[in-house]
C-alpha cells in the first residue's frame, strides 16, 4: 500500500479531484521537466543531433519496462487515434469478415474501424454488454461476450483492458488466446489502464497496443505509445518523416535519401518525436510510476475504490462488484438515473468526477486523501 502522494502534485487542499480517468494532474517533477525542455528550446544553439535521439530512446525504454516488452517494439504517437490508424492501415481485412468492438467503446476505437469496414466490405460487429449476476452485485461480463463472439469470420478484435465508461474489466489472456486460435488480430487501447492496472505484453501478445499519456501514465497531452508486435515491424507507417529513416542521426547526410528505415517499430514514430518538452515530461512520469510499481498502485487504488463502492451502496447506489471491474476504476449508478446537474453541483464544491454513459465515474489516484472521499459523500447525501 502506498501512502498519499499528494505532496508530489499541485492540488490545493480544498479540491477533491477524483477524476484521473478524465485527465491526470501533472506531478511537480513532470511540470519541472516540461519547463526545462521549454528552456532548452528557448536556446536552440545548445541543442545538438544526439538530443534528437537520446531522450526518446530512454523514454521508449521506460515504457517497455512498464509493459514488459522490447523497446524495439515501441513507437511514439501523438494520440490514441494515430496509433489505431496505424493498426488499421496494416491489418488485413477481407469483405465479409468481422471487426469486433464493444458496445459504447471509446469513439477513437470505433470510427477508424467503421472506415475500414466501409473500404473493405467487412462488417463491424458490436458486442452488447453481458450482465453477470453474482453475490457482489450485477456487473458487465465483457470477457464471456467477447469469447462467444470471436469466430471464423473475425478478422480483428479492437477492445480495451477496462471499459472507459465504468471500468468493467476484460480478461485479456483468454481473449488473446481465442484470437490466435481463429487467426484474428487483437488491437488494444489501454489508455484507461496503462500505469494503474497490471498488464504483461509477453503474456497477452497483442498485435497492436495503444496508450495515451495524459491519464493513468500521469504524463502530458499529445504524447503516447504504440506497441507493435514483431510480425508487423515491416509495415507501412502513417507518415513518412526523416527521423524514422536509416542514418537519420547524420544531419549532414539527410539529403542522401534512404528507402530503409530505422530498426524495429521506429518507422512508425510520429514526426518531430524529439519534442523537447513533452518527451522529458513523459519520461519523468514513467520513472515515478516505475518507482511506485504498478502492482502497488493497483493495490492501493483498489482499496480506495472498494471503500467508495461500500459507501455508495449504503446510500442506495449501485456499484459494480470488484471481480468484474479494474480496481482503480469505479462506475456508480443511481437507481433513478443521474441528475443532469450532478457535475455542476459537485463542481461548485470543488469536487470533480465524471459521467460516462449511465455511470458516475469515480477514479481516484495516489494524490487523493480520505478527506476527498468524505467530501464527495457529504455532498451526495446533502444534494442527492
Image: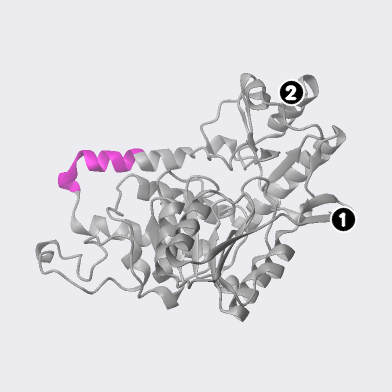
Check disc 1: other Cα within 10 Å, few if <14, some if 14-19, many if 20+.
Answer: few
Please state which of residues 197 and 135 is positioned toward the viewer in this rendering: 135
Give SS at disc 1: strand
Q: Quadrant of residue 377?
A: top right
- The residue where tag 1 is placed is 134
Give the colour scheme shown: one colour
Query: Can you say whether 286 is above or below 368 in the image?
Result: below
Q: Is residue 71 visible?
A: no
Q: Are marks 1 and 2 in contact (CB under 8 Å)?
A: no
x, y (%) of residue 108? 49, 51
Query: Can you say whether 384 is above or below 19 in the image?
Result: above
The span shown in magenta is 35-46
Answer left or right for 300 relative to 221: right
Most common secondary structure along the magenta stretch = helix
Point out the residue furthest to the right here. 135
Give SS at disc 2: helix
Check disc 2: other Cα within 10 Å, few if <14, some if 14-19, many if 20+.
Answer: some
**Residue at (33%, 65%) from the top-left corner?**
237
- The residue where tag 2 is placed is 379
Q: Split into 4 quadrants, where in the image is the C terminus?
A: top right
Amino acid at each position: 500500500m502506498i501512502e498519499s502522494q499528494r505532496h508530489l502534485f499541485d492540488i490545493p487542499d480544498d479540491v477533491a479531484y477524483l477524476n484521473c480517468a478524465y485527465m491526470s494532474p501533472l506531478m511537480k517533477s513532470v511540470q519541472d521537466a516540461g519547463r526545462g525542455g521549454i528552456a532548452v528550446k528557448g536556446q536552440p544553439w545548445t541543442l545538438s543531433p544526439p538530443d534528437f535521439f537520446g531522450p526518446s530512446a530512454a523514454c521508449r525504454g521506460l515504457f517497455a519496462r512498464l509493459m514488459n516488452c522490447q523497446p524495439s517494439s515501441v513507437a511514439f504517437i501523438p494520440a490514441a487515434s494515430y496509433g489505431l490508424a496505424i493498426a488499421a492501415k496494416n491489418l488485413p481485412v477481407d469483405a465479409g469478415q468481422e471487426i469486433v468492438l464493444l458496445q459504447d467503446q471509446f469513439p477513437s476505437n470505433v470510427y477508424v474501424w467503421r472506415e475500414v469496414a466501409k473500404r473493405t466490405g467487412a462488417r463491424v460487429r458490436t458486442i452488447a454488454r453481458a450482465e453477470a449476476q453474482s453475490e457482489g452485485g450485477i456487473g458487465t461480463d465483457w470477457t464471456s461476450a467477447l469469447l462467444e463472439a470471436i469466430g471464423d469470420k473475425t478478422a480483428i478484435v479492437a477492445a480495451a483492458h477496462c471499459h472507459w465508461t465504468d471500468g468493467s474489466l476484460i480478461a485479456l489472456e483468454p481473449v488473446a488466446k481465442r484470437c490466435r486460435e481463429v487467426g484474428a488480430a487483437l488491437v488494444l487501447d489501454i489508455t484507461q489502464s496503462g500505469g494503474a492496472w497490471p498488464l504483461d505484453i509477453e503474456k497477452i501478445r497483442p498485435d497492436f497496443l495503444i496508450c495515451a499519456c495524459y491519464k493513468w501514465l500521469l504524463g502530458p497531452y499529445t504524447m503516447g505509445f504504440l506497441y507493435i508486435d514483431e510480425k508487423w515491424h515491416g509495415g507501412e507507417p502513417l507518415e513518412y518523416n526523416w527521423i524514422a529513416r536509416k542514418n537519420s542521426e547524420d544531419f549532414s547526410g539527410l539529403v542522401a535519401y534512404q528507402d530503409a528505415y530505422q530498426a524495429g517499430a521506429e518507422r512508425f514514430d510520429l514526426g518531430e518525436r524529439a519534442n523537447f518538452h513533452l518527451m522529458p515530461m513523459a519520461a519523468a512520469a514513467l520513472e515515478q510510476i516505475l518507482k511506485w510499481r504498478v502492482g502497488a498502485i493497483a493495490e492501493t487504488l483498489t482499496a480506495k475504490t472498494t471503500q467508495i463502492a461500500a459507501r455508495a451502496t449504503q446510500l442506495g447506489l449501485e456499484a459494480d462488484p470488484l471481480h468484474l471491474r479494474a480496481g482503480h476504476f469505479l462506475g456508480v449508478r443511481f437507481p433513478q438515473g443521474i441528475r443532469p446537474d450532478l457535475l455542476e453541483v459537485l463542481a461548485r464544491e470543488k469536487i470533480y468526477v465524471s459521467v460516462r454513459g449511465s455511470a458516475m465515474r469515480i477514479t481516484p489516484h495516489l494524490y487523493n486523501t480520505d478527506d476527498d472521499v468524505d467530501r464527495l459523500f457529504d455532498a451526495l447525501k446533502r444534494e442527492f
